[in-house]
């Protein structure tokens, strides 16, 4: 997947580039609206990460241009302002999703995948990995042919793991993903532990392999190469 | 009192004074004028009599002599200056057999060397008889004026004050958040024009200040969130490198602190936004559905903590609140009720343990974290048109419940929360003029929000169908404690 990162902060752009690069994404970045226009005029991208606050203007103004020139690419707005106005305007002008700083890179990745699934795979809403197949429309997860009896949160969690496989997911990132921004519940990692425990048990009962491992002190990891 | 009424009353007072003075003037003027006319008539009559004397002849029976007295007088009785004077006063009128006002005009003549004093008199209407007439007519004038002032006052003030009223309407509908400057209708009245100019200037200033404050908040948010995002990203990347266990612990601790930082920051930004009244309700929100959705989203947490959830949610309760705020309100309250939920202590001394970190007073309340003796934590959610009541079991707070609404105040200092959720809840309630109440009694935390304006939240607790206290055994009491 080819991704354009329009973000004026070099460090943040590099974080994203590094993280997505490991997924095998081809990332390019630029830090101004002008630069973005140039790149967009020359190349095609599958996904655009757009920061709202750019040195030469509001990133929202780029949306019209993007929508006119690149109908198919996904636009994900990155903003530090969680002002409702920005969010609504951004989504109205054709952005596909909105993520506020400070975000976990794994969360950003999950959002990119979700937007990509919705738009590019034309209804094929199955996420498959080895024996797992997850239907993101019906929220049904299967191990082989066996239907996993997951709760909505557990489904969400499994999807998050598979999308971010082979990555260490911190408990904070998992909690933020499952419960959103405003709940103070994040502090309570017991819930994360419980969810992961239940999920592993259910996968085991359905005959799936135990891909999920605990990373000491940090969180969890979904290993695609067991024993490797 | 309305301006028009005030003006009318003042005018009426002034009119009354003017009419009283005017009445007196008219009264004395008429009185003087009548005397004057009579005096002139009598002077002419006296002149006529003098003419008759000059002509000679007997005029004794002549009508001119009916009320005349002609007396020849010696020269030394002649007044040195002036040839006539008049006197008046009450005198007996034999024709009408009554005392009447009598006017005497005396003139002096010198005819053929002989001096005469000619006195004629007549009875004129008494001034006292005129008085009721004057008073009467002024009474009618006053009445007429009053009616005119009241009617015209209403009409004219409506016309004159129209620009003022338009200005008032414009001001009332003015919103700091609007993008346009305040537009006020033009007027010919200089005072109103001044007022309008002043208002336009003032609102413009307020709008600019508001805008810059808003921008500052957003910029501050932006500037702080970006470095936080960088640190978080770096930590995410660092986690995946080859690290030792000690390093992992360090990273985890940094992640935790970062989480708190970002959460405190976004909460404070949110509070500022609330204070700036940036979230105005555009249309009433159905809080019944929202409450059900919120509870559903917390369903798994409730099950994980083995809590008993009892709900009474009235259908189609609409409240005037921004959707995001209503969501925030419910999320904060329900997540609080889950997070701080501790099952009630079991009956009997064996199960009792001192609650850690709660101070000495609540030694009787067991920690119960593991659900001592099978007691389960409880959450009750009662939503009606009047308000929302959330009841949950929990440890006794170490500070008074009302203080928990303040920022960074926590009931248990050991908990991981940042203590800002209830401050946000209260801010939302203050903004919407909902009364909110938090009390703790007998092992139950009770949070009540009244949706009705000017209605205390404590009223909600009176109509609940469940008790607000646990009985001694730690189970839910059947009797109603509050009536």
Image (tube, coloured by chain):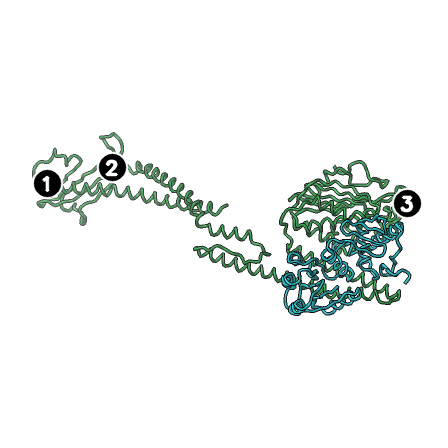
Q: Position of residue B214 (x, y in %)?
A: 64, 60
Q: What color is chain A drawn in?
A: cyan
Q: Residues within 10 Å of mark 1 (few under 14, many from 20)?
A: some
Instruction: For marks 2 and 3, give the one nearer the viewer.
Output: 3
Q: Quadrant of residue A228?
A: bottom right
Q: Which residue corresponds to the image point at 44% horizontal and 57% vertical from the top-left?
A: B190
For image coordinates 63% across by 50% down, the residue present is: B281
Label 2 sits on residue: B124
In the figure, residue B377 lies in which quadrant? Answer: top right
Work out whether disc 1 and disc 3 sit on a shared chain: yes
Q: Disc 3 on helix, strand or loop?
A: helix
Taking the spot 37% from the left edge, 40% from the top edge, the residue there is B144
- The residue that label 3 is drawn on is B351
* Element on which disc 2 rests: strand
The answer as to whether the residues below labels 2 and 1 share one chain is yes
Percent from the top left, x then y, of residue A141? 82, 51
Label 2 vs label 3: CA separation?
119 Å
Q: Chain of mark 2?
A: B
Q: CA separation, marks 1 and 3?
A: 144 Å
**Residue B52 place in picture, x, y as percent:** 10, 40
| Disc 1: which residue | B53
- Which residue extends farthest right? B350
Of the image marks 1 and 3, the number of the one nearer the N terminus? 1
User: For the residues marked 2 and 1, what is the alpha-carbon distance in whole angstroms?
Assistant: 27 Å
| Chain to which the residue tagged by mark 1 belongs | B
Q: Earlier in the sequence, mark 2 or mark 1?
A: 1
Q: Are marks 1 and 3 in contact (CB under 8 Å)?
A: no
Tell which tag, 1 or 3, sits nearer the viewer.
3
Which hue belongs to chain B? Answer: green
Q: Position of residue A38 (x, y in %)?
A: 65, 69
- Considering depth in this image, is B88 or B126 the residue closer to the camera? B126
Residue at 44% x, 44% y is B154
């Amino acid at each position: 997947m080819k991704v354009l990162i329009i973000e004026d902060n070099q460090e943040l752009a590099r974080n994203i580039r590094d993280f997505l690069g490991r997924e095998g994404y081809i990332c390019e970045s630029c830090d101004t609206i002008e630069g973005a226009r140039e790149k967009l005029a020359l190349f095609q991208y599958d996904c655009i990460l757009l920061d709202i606050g750019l040195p030469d203007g509001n990133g929202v103004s780029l949306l019209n241009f993007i929508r006119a020139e690149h109908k198919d690419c996904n636009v994900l707005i990155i903003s530090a302002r969680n002002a409702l106005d920005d969010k609504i305007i951004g989504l109205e002008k054709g952005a596909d999703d909105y993520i506020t700083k400070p975000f976990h890179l794994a969360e950003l990745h999950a959002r990119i995948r979700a937007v990509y699934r919705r738009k590019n795979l034309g209804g094929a809403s199955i996420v498959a990995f080895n024996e797992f197949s997850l239907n993101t429309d019906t929220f049904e997860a299967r191990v082989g042919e066996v239907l996993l009896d997951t709760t909505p949160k557990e489904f969400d969690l499994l999807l998050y793991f598979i999308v971010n496989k082979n990555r260490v997911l911190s408990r904070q990132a998992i909690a933020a993903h499952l419960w959103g921004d405003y709940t103070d519940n994040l502090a309570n990692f017991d819930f994360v532990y419980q969810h992961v425990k239940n999920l592993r048990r259910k996968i085991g009962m359905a005959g799936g392999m135990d891909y999920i491992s605990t990373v000491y002190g940090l969180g969890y990891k979904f290993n695609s190469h067991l024993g490797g | 009192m309305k301006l028009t009424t005030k003006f009318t009353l003042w005018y009426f007072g002034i009119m009354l004074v003017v009419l009283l003075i005017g009445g007196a003037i008219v009264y004395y003027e008429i009185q003087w004028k009548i005397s004057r006319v009579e005096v002139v008539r009598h002077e002419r009559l006296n002149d006529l009599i003098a003419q008759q004397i000059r002509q000679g002849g007997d005029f004794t029976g002549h009508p001119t002599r009916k009320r005349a007295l002609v007396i020849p007088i010696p020269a030394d009785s002649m007044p040195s200056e002036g040839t006539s004077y008049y006197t008046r006063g009450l005198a007996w009128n034999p024709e009408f057999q009554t005392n009447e006002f009598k006017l005497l005009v005396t003139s002096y003549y010198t005819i053929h060397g002989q001096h005469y004093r000619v006195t004629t008199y007549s009875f004129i209407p008494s001034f006292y008889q005129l008085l009721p007439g004057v008073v009467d007519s002024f009474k009618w004038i006053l009445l007429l004026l009053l009616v005119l002032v009241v009617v015209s006052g209403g009409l004219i003030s409506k016309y004159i004050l129209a620009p003022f009223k338009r200005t008032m309407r414009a001001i009332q509908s003015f919103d700091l958040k609007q993008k346009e400057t305040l537009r006020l209708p033009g007027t010919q009245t200089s005072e109103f024009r001044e007022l309008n100019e002043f208002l336009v200037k003032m609102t413009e200033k307020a709008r600019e200040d508001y805008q810059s404050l808003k921008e500052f908040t957003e910029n501050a948010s932006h500037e702080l969130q970006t470095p936080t995002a960088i640190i978080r990203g770096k930590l995410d990347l660092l986690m995946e490198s080859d690290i030792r266990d000690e390093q992992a612990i360090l990273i985890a601790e940094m992640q935790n602190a970062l989480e708190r930082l970002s959460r405190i920051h976004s909460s404070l930004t949110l509070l500022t936004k609330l204070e700036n009244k940036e979230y105005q309700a555009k249309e009433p929100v159905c809080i019944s559905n929202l409450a059900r959705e919120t509870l559903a989203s917390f369903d798994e947490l409730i099950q994980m903590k083995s809590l008993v959830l009892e709900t009474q949610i009235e259908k189609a309760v609409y409240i005037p609140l921004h959707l995001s705020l209503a969501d925030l309100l419910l999320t904060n309250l329900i997540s609080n009720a889950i997070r701080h939920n501790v099952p009630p202590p079991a009956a009997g001394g064996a199960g009792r343990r001192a609650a850690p970190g709660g101070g000495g007073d609540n030694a009787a309340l067991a920690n119960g974290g593991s659900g001592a003796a099978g007691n389960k934590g409880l959450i009750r959610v009662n939503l009606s048109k009047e308000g929302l009541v959330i009841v949950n079991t929990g440890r006794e707070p170490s500070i008074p419940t009302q203080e928990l609404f303040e920022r960074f105040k926590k009931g248990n200092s050991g908990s991981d929360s940042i203590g800002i959720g209830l401050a946000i809840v209260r801010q939302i309630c203050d903004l919407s003029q909902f009364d909110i109440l938090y009390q703790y009694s007998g092992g139950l935390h009770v949070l009540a929000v009244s949706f009705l304006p000017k209605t205390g939240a404590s009223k909600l607790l009176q109509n609940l169908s469940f008790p607000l206290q646990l009985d001694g055994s730690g189970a839910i009491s059947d009797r109603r404690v509050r009536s």
